[in-house]
Every structure is written in structure tokens, then in C-alpha cells.
Amino acid sequence: MSDDNQVGKIGWIDITVDDATGLRDFYKAVVGWTAEDVKMGDYSDYSMAIPDTDEAVTGICHARGSNASLRGGWLIYIIVEDVEASAAACVAHGGKVVVDPRALSGGTFCVIEDPSGATAALYQG
């Protein structure tokens, strides 16, 4: 997650897929990202980094555990001031909360679906 917690900024992006290991290898070959394992209990997801700086820029996650209910595709994490309040505003304005607020990387996040059907995560550091 980005160290910059500016409200409204996209702070992270990741993707959840059935074959995270295969997709990790795909992006290593196609983009040149390097990978670091992120332990998730009995398996690992992957933090992908820029090769020359080792700056983490994205995650590639297995569609299991807490990610099992997420649809495939890239998921942006938008910085908000208050995840609980933003989740309530989402519902009040015709959206849905797909993943209830919970802890993540020293903060709190949730996943929402907007009225168009697109998903995004909201993150409060």
C-alpha cells in the first residue's frame, strides 16, 4: 500500500485469480516485475515490484481464503478518510458492500460495488 494516505488517491492495485503463480510468472516475463512472496497461511500471494528500485507497485493474489468471493480483474484501492462512513455512503447511494470493513496492512479496507457494477476497494490507513 502507498505510504501516501491522501484521501481520494489510488493507493494500490491488485488482482485476484485462480492461478496467481502463473500470472506472477506472466507479468515477470512480460513487464519485468520482480516478485516477493506474501505469506497467507498455507500459501503465498505476491507483491510485484519495479526491478531497478524494488518499489512494490501491485499484488497478485490467489482466489482463496478472504479473496475467494472477489471477482477476477484488477482491483483499485482508493484512500478514504473513514472506511465505515464511506461503506455506509456507498449503500445509501445505490451501491453494495461486497467485503465488509476489516483490517489490512496497518489500516482498514472494504470492497464495494458501485451502481454500474464495477468494484473498488476503499482503504483507510
Image (cartoon, grey):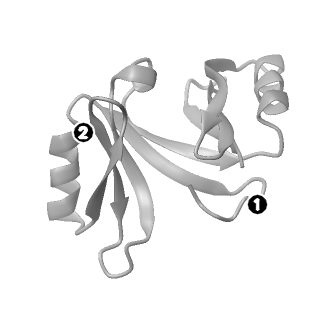
Q: Which mark is residue 66?
A: none
The answer to whether residue 110 is seen in the rendering is: yes
User: What element does badge 1 sit on?
Assistant: loop
Which residue in the structure is indicated by mark 1?
A: 6
x then y, percent, for residue 69: 44, 17
What residue do we see at 24% from left, 66% from top?
31
Which residue in the structure is indicated by mark 2?
A: 20
x then y, percent, for residue 109: 65, 35
Disc 2 crowd, CA 10 A, few/some/many (<14, 14-19, 20+): some
x then y, percent, for residue 28: 20, 61
Residue type highlighted by circle 1 = Gln
User: What element does badge 2 sit on?
Assistant: helix
Disc 1 crowd, CA 10 A, few/some/many (<14, 14-19, 20+): some
Looking at the image, is 104 positioned above or below residue 78? Answer: above
The answer to which of 10 and 62 lies nearer the viewer is 62
Looking at the image, tell me whether mark 1 or mark 2 is earlier in sequence order.
1
| Left or right relative to 61: residue 1 | right
The answer to which quarter of the image holds residue 56 is: bottom left
CA–CA distance in space, label 1 to label 2 = 30 Å
